[in-house]
Image: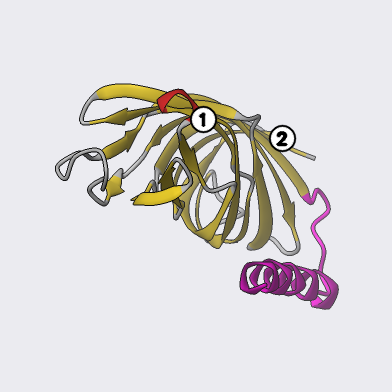
């Protein structure tokens, strides 16, 4: 209930900003395509029932990402970050014990500092909802939560290439976690909390 309330509250904030801003951008939409390296923090509890020193880690990988931004004013925008379900391998003390898929849409509210300049830095904050599926750990004996909700912070910069095109660098920190189960019993918890470092191109329309 608290997670649902948080997501609805954030959506209401975005809607309020949009409906109360008098000056709307002439070209309010920006779509970006990025290549993003996902680097999990991999802070986990020791696994009870397997070995007191065993630690869980999740594979780092580079993924494609697309995001859609809507500018309420030249400085204020909302961004929805999307990708397709990504497969990650899971390791215990360096040994591969299985995999899972995650779909992590993220909604952010941004402030752009220099919208009229060729170099336009921005900061953002919002919420991430991760859907976890296709969990196959320890031959089906291990499990993860079906979803995770957490905060997200963002910093980036757009380099204007033309009236419509830009080059983008972007860094996000996403809070993502899950309990780890073995035959239905909780044996650990992992704070995945990845850094997402990306680069790509944007198109304004």
| Residue 76 image point, x, y percent | 65, 64
**Tag nearer the camera, 2 or 1:** 1
Which quadrant of the rendered structure holds the N terminus?
A: bottom right
Image position, residue 103 (x, y; %):
62, 38
Residue 94, how many percent across, how many down? 22, 25
Q: Nearer the viewer, residue 195 or 101?
A: 101
Residue 22: within the magenta? yes
User: What residue is drawn where x is 43% and y is 50%?
Assistant: 185
Residue that lies at the very extreme toward the left in this rendered image: 53
Q: Please tell me whether the stretch drawn in magenta is mainly helix, strand or loop.
A: helix
Q: CA distance from mark 2 to mark 1?
A: 38 Å
Q: Which is nearer the eye, 16 or 192? A: 192
Residue 189 visible here: no
* Labels 2 and 1 touching (C-beta < 8 A): no
Which is more toward the observer, 70 or 52? Answer: 52
Which residue sits at x=56%, y=28%? Answer: 86
Position of residue 57 relative to residue 96, above or below, is below
Can see residue 131?
Answer: yes
Mark 1, Cα crowd under 10 Å, few <14 / some 14-19 / many 20+, is some
In the displayed structure, does residue 111 sit left or right of residue 59? right
Q: Quadrant of residue 62?
A: top left
**Is the residue 199 above or below the residue 27 in the image?**
above
Residue under circle 2? 164
Query: Magenta stretch?
Result: 1-28
Q: Which residue does the image show at 69% across and 67% down from the upper left? A: 4
**Residue that badge 1 annotates:** 100
Residue at 68% x, 58% y is 78
Regarding mark 1 in the picture, which secondary structure is present there?
Answer: strand
* Residue 68 lies in the magenta stretch: no
Depth order, front residue of 88/160: 88
């Amino acid at each position: 209930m608290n997670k649902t309330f948080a997501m609805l509250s954030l959506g209401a904030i975005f809607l309020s900003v949009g409906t109360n801003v008098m000056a709307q951008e002439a070209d309010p939409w920006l779509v970006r395509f990025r290549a993003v390296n996902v680097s999990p923090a991999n802070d986990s509890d020791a696994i009870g029932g397997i070995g007191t020193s065993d630690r869980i880690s999740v594979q780092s990988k580079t993924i494609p990402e697309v995001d859609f931004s809507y500018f309420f004013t030249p400085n204020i925008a909302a961004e929805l970050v999307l990708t397709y379900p990504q497969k990650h391998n899971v390791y215990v003390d360096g040994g591969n014990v299985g995999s899972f898929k995650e779909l992590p849409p993220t909604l952010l509210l941004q402030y752009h500092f220099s919208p009229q300049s060729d170099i336009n830095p921005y900061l953002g904050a919002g919420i991430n909802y991760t859907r976890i599926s296709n969990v196959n750990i320890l031959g089906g004996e291990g499990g993860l939560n079906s979803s995770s909700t957490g905060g997200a912070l963002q910093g980036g910069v757009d380099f204007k290439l033309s009236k419509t095109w830009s080059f983008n660098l972007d860094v996000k920190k996403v809070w993502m976690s899950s309990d780890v189960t073995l035959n239905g019993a909780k044996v650990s918890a992992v704070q995945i909390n990845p850094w997402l470092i990306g680069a790509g191109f944007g198109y304004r329309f």
